[in-house]
């Protein structure tokens, strides 16, 4: 599939079939995340796969935005394994985790798996529920599964600001 077509067709799925993803599909999605570039190739990402009825029930206590998805992946980063920008100390790890998440989200779509990137979750609840160590920082939750037959994009999915409002050349 052409990349721009893939990017245009992918949408945030909020209605799923009640079917956990098979391990082979999860492995392909994780492989795409594993290929993502990270600052100095430190690979600080840590991914928690939730693909059982019990873990998905537990997830519901950490976010209202799970949309009944049968599978989820919590993308985190290790605070101790990140490149620091020398000018101001900014960390690459949060950006790295987002790049990993994007790779996985697009790979999922290419495999016929719908997903929604969720940031609306309680990090403290995630830490407690899933025993996440202090050095691991949750960044993004991908809820995913096979789209329900009547799943469709949100009405705002195809609305974009004009390109000249978001892109500048040479100076702001």
Image (tube, rainbow, N blue to C red):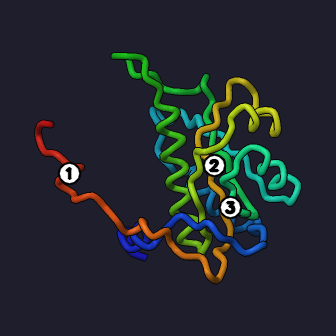
Q: Which residue is mark 2?
A: 141
Point out residue 164 in the picture as x, y percentages from the top left corner.
17, 54
Give the farthest residue toward the right: 54
Question: Is the residue marked by circle 3 packed among few (<14), some (14-19), or many (20+) residues within 10 Å?
Answer: some
Q: Which residue is mark 1?
A: 165
Give the farthest residue toward the bottom: 149
Of the numbered discs 1 and 3, the one sitting upstream in the chain is 3
Of the numbered discs 2 and 1, the one sitting upstream in the chain is 2
Quadrant (top left, top right, bottom left, bottom right) of the C terminus: top left
Q: Secondary structure at mark 3?
A: loop
Q: Secondary structure at mark 1?
A: helix
Point out residue 119 in the picture as x, y percentages from the top left corner.
58, 45
User: On the picture, is 169 further left or further right than 58?
Assistant: left
In this rendering, the label closer to the viewer, 2 or 1: 1
In this rendering, the label closer to the viewer, 2 or 3: 3
Point out residue 65 in the picture as x, y percentages from the top left corner.
66, 53
Task: Point out which mark residue 67 bears.
Answer: 3
Which residue is drawn at the image coordinates 63% and 63% (left, top)? 28
The alpha-carbon separation of the residues under discs 2 and 1 comes to: 29 Å
In the picture, residue 132 is in which quadrant? top right
Question: Is the residue marked by circle 2 packed among few (<14), some (14-19), or many (20+) residues within 10 Å?
Answer: many
Which residue is drawn at the image coordinates 55% and 50% (left, top)? 101
In the picture, residue 62 is in which quadrant? top right
The alpha-carbon separation of the residues under discs 2 and 3 comes to: 12 Å
The alpha-carbon separation of the residues under discs 1 and 3 comes to: 32 Å
Point out residue 42 in the picture as x, y percentages from the top left corner.
53, 33
Q: As rendered, which of 16 and 48 lies closer to the eye?
A: 16
Q: As rendered, which of 84 and 51 lies closer to the eye?
A: 51
């Amino acid at each position: 599939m052409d990349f721009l077509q893939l990017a245009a067709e992918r949408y945030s799925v909020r209605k799923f079939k009640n079917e956990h993803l098979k391990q082979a599909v999860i492995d392909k999605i994780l492989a795409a995340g594993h290929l993502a570039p990270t600052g100095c190739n430190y690979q600080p990402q840590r991914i928690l796969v939730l693909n059982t009825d019990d873990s998905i029930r537990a997830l519901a206590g950490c976010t209202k935005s799970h949309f009944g998805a049968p599978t989820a992946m919590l993308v985190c980063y290790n605070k101790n394994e990140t490149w620091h920008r020398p000018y101001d100390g900014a960390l690459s790890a949060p950006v790295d985790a987002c790049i990993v998440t994007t790779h996985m989200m697009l790979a999922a779509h290419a495999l016929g798996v719908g997903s929604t990137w969720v940031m609306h979750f309680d990090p403290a609840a995630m830490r407690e529920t899933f025993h996440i160590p202090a050095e691991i920082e949750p960044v993004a939750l991908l809820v995913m599964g096979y789209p329900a037959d009547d799943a469709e994009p949100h009405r705002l999915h195809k609305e974009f600001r004009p390109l000249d409002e978001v892109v500048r050349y040479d100076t702001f």
